[in-house]
Amino acid sequence: SPNHIKERDSRQCEQNLKNILEIWKGISLNDFQQGVLQTKESFIQKWEESLLKTITLQTNISESTELTGDILCRACGYLLGKLDKVRQYENAHFISDHDFYNRIEEKLFNQPQTYARSSDIGKALCGSKNCRTQLGCIKKLNDYPEISPIYPLKCASIKIKSETGEMILKKKWSQMPFKFPKLSKNVDINNDDDIFYDASDSLPGDS
């Protein structure tokens, strides 16, 4: 009957516990401590191996992922530039492309905010007339005066649209599944005099 089976299983469980307790009584304190230490070391080793595999996989994916897609204003979807034009300077990321400078609005500070290696001279706003969300800052680099200013974008202010239409939204650039080229003095930045967007201009995509 069900009750008989339940009672039998209960007695077997009690017997198993008694057997385990007898085994424990025969283990010295030193053997117990050694067992705990070995188990701990084994657990740490497996965790480190798993972590290394994860980091390696993420690095390989990042390095092998092509930079194809569009950078959009997160607030309104206005096109800012191409993903393959993104460059990295320290922790800052910016679009190095002629057209980008025509797709933003500049708001310069009365007084620059000066740091050891750079100066923030203003804000970069979305170029869409119905948006004007702040996208980032305007920064002059002491190390790269010939290619300054750059316009570092806040990751939380942009989104990436892949070729398949997938939207990628992250809070930090470090969370992006891409590895961006580092800024170098050979970077191709167009130095035409008339590259900056004027608030009175009408750009394709304005709505």
Image (tube, rainbow, N blue to C red):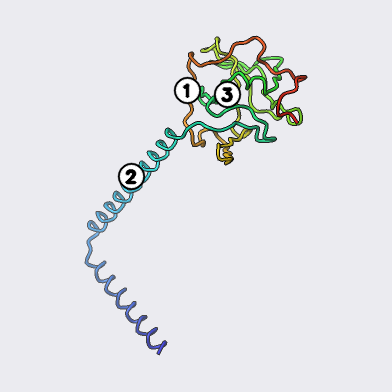
Q: Residue at x 36, y 41 (%)?
A: 52
Percent position of residue 104, x then y: 68, 23
Is 32 left, or right, of 89 in this rendering?
Answer: left
Q: Nearer the viewer, residue 81 or 28?
A: 81
Q: Secondary structure at mark 2?
A: helix
**What residue sits right under mark 2 in the picture?**
49
Identify the mark nearer the N-term, 3 or 1: 3
As drawn, 49 above or below 18: above
**What residue sits right under mark 1 in the picture?**
182
Q: Nearer the viewer, residue 77 or 52?
A: 77
Question: Quadrant of the rendered structure where residue 70 is?
Answer: top right
Percent position of residue 122, x then y: 67, 19
Crowd around label 2: few <14 · some 14–19 · many ≥20 (10 Å):
few
**What residue sits right under mark 3 in the picture?**
95
Q: Secondary structure at mark 1?
A: loop
* Amino acid type at mark 2: Glu
As drawn, 160 above or below 181: below
Crowd around label 1: few <14 · some 14–19 · many ≥20 (10 Å):
few
Q: Secondary structure at mark 3?
A: strand
Crowd around label 3: few <14 · some 14–19 · many ≥20 (10 Å):
many
Q: Nearer the viewer, residue 145 or 111?
A: 145
